[in-house]
Image (cartoon, grey):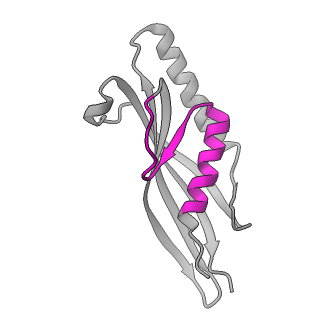
């Protein structure tokens, strides 16, 4: 039976980020409710690694966009960089994700930070910070 690995990774990552960042986390077709801050996960693709008769190794890539209402003052700048540090440490300190199908995503990493992601028109009043998240998974074990 095929397992939706993408969904399992997104659900686990959303849960981890929601708990650590204390803000809403959305992905896919989730309805975004604007708030002072929220995170949007955008799956960007996967890379197939080793394939054997009994398993398939993949690296999954997800863009992480962290939206914060722009307050344009010194205290906000400190808050923004504190939040960047918290999110990066949260991923760094959790190198695996337990998935709903009792498997594990491993080599969980968050890449370079972009402090100025270009917003969609509806988010002009937000600062958007971006990262590329990646993890590996061994699936189709048989």
Quadrant of the frame with the N terminus: bottom right
Please identify the residue farthest to the right as the structure is shown.
102
Q: Determine the image quadrant of residue 93.
A: top right
List x then y, in percent, for residue 59. 53, 65
Residue at 59 percent of width and 29 percent of height: 85
Q: Is residue 25 found left or right of 116 in the rendered image?
A: right
Q: Determine the image quadrant of residue 103.
A: bottom right
List x then y, in percent, for residue 9. 59, 58
List x then y, in percent, for residue 35. 47, 27
Quadrant of the frame with the C terminus: bottom right
List x then y, in percent, for residue 13. 60, 50
Q: Determine the image quadrant of residue 97.
A: bottom right
Q: Is residue 84 found left or right of 127 in the rendered image?
A: right
Tell me: residue 67, above or below residue 5.
above
Specify start and end residues of the magenta stretch as a single range: 7-34
Please identify the residue farthest to the top as the structure is shown.
74
Q: Is residue 92 found left or right of 7 in the rendered image?
A: right
Residue 91 in view (yes/no): no
Residue 104 in view (yes/no): yes
- Give whichever of 40, 117 is nearer the camera: 40
Please identify the residue farthest to the bottom as the structure is shown.
53
Taking the magenta stretch, the answer to whether it contains residue 75 is: no
Q: Is residue 66 found left or right of 1 in the rendered image?
A: left
Residue at 57 percent of width and 67 percent of height: 5
Residue at 45 percent of width and 26 percent of height: 68
Tell me: residue 73, above or below residue 61.
above
Residue at 62 percent of width and 80 percent of height: 140
């Amino acid at each position: 039976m095929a397992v939706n690995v993408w969904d399992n990774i997104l659900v686990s990552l959303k849960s981890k980020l929601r708990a650590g960042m204390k803000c809403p986390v959305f992905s896919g077709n989730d309805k975004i409710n604007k708030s002072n801050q929220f995170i949007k996960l955008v799956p960007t693709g996967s890379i197939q690694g080793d394939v054997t008769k009994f398993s398939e190794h993949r690296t999954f890539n997800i863009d992480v966009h962290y939206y914060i209402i722009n307050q344009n003052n010194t205290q906000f700048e400190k808050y923004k960089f504190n939040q960047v540090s918290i999110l990066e440490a949260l991923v760094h300190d959790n190198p695996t994700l337990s998935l709903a199908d009792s498997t594990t995503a491993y080599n969980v990493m968050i890449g370079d930070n972009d402090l100025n992601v270009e917003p969609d028109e509806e988010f002009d009043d937000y600062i958007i910070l971006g990262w590329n998240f990646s993890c590996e998974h061994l699936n189709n074990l048989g």
